[in-house]
Image (tube, rainbow, N blue to C red):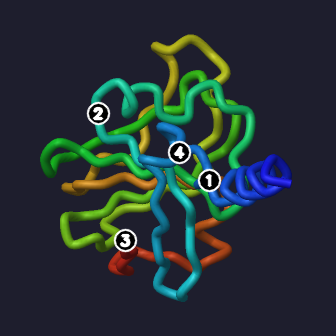
Amino acid sequence: MRSLLTLGAALLLAGCTPKPVTVADLYANDLKLPGGQVIHVQTMVNQWDRLRGLAFQTSLAPDHGVLFLQDAPGRYSYWMYQHFIPLDMIWLDDKQRIVEIVENAQPCKTVASKCPYYGGNQTASFVLKIPGGMVKKYNLKVGDAIRW
């Protein structure tokens, strides 16, 4: 009887174990759009993460994206070399207001030296990349605030 109670208690406690946390979970955030919608993003905080970004990814779920945190405000351009999906790119200032948008940037299917650069025309502290078409879907425009 005592063994059965011990086994039952162990099973109950096993069900209370929290979900394992992955490194990706530590860098995950929710952003709130002006219309109240939520975008789930992975945050790129260091140079190596920013360099890799969304390269080599073959899909990105709707309402998901990547938020790049820059070390300092500046003019940051991006390219689509080794990207496989169209992206909307949104530059935000230090007050989390949109200062520049590029919609449906297409993957570059040539050598790196021939890939165009996008954006970087305004000073920004953050860059949000989301699936192509999301800017239009949520009617995002320069001056809108995105909160986190």
x and y, in percent, of residue 15 in the image:
72, 57
Element under disc 1: loop
Using the image, tell me which numbered label, if any, was put on residue 7: none
The answer to whether the residue labelled 2 contacts the one labelled 1, judged by CB atoms less than 8 Å apart, is: no
Q: Residue type at mark 3?
A: Trp
Q: CA distance from mark 3 to mark 1?
A: 28 Å
Disc 4 marks which residue?
21
Q: Label 2 neighbourhood size at 10 Å, few (<14), some (14-19), many (20+)? A: few
Nearest to viewer (mark 3 / mark 1): 1
Q: CA distance from mark 4 to mark 3?
A: 21 Å
Q: Residue at x 28, y 70 (%)?
A: 96
Q: Where's the N terminus, which quadrant? A: bottom right
Q: Residue at x 43, y 47 (%)?
A: 26
Q: Horizontally, is 66 left or right of 104 in the view?
A: left
Specify which label sits upstream in the sequence, 4 or 3. 4
Closer to us: 100 or 57? 57
Q: CA distance from mark 3 to mark 2?
A: 19 Å
Using the image, determine if residue 41 lies above or below residue 38: above
The answer to whether the residue labelled 4 contacts the one labelled 3, judged by CB atoms less than 8 Å apart, is: no
Q: Residue at x 23, y 54 (%)?
A: 125
Using the image, tell me which numbered label, if any, was put on residue 46: 2
Specify which label sits upstream in the sequence, 2 or 4. 4
Element under disc 3: loop
Q: Horizontally, is 69 left or right of 115 in the view?
A: left
Q: Where's the C terminus, which quadrant? A: bottom left
Q: Horizontally, is 64 left or right of 1 in the view?
A: left
Res. 144 image quadrant: bottom left
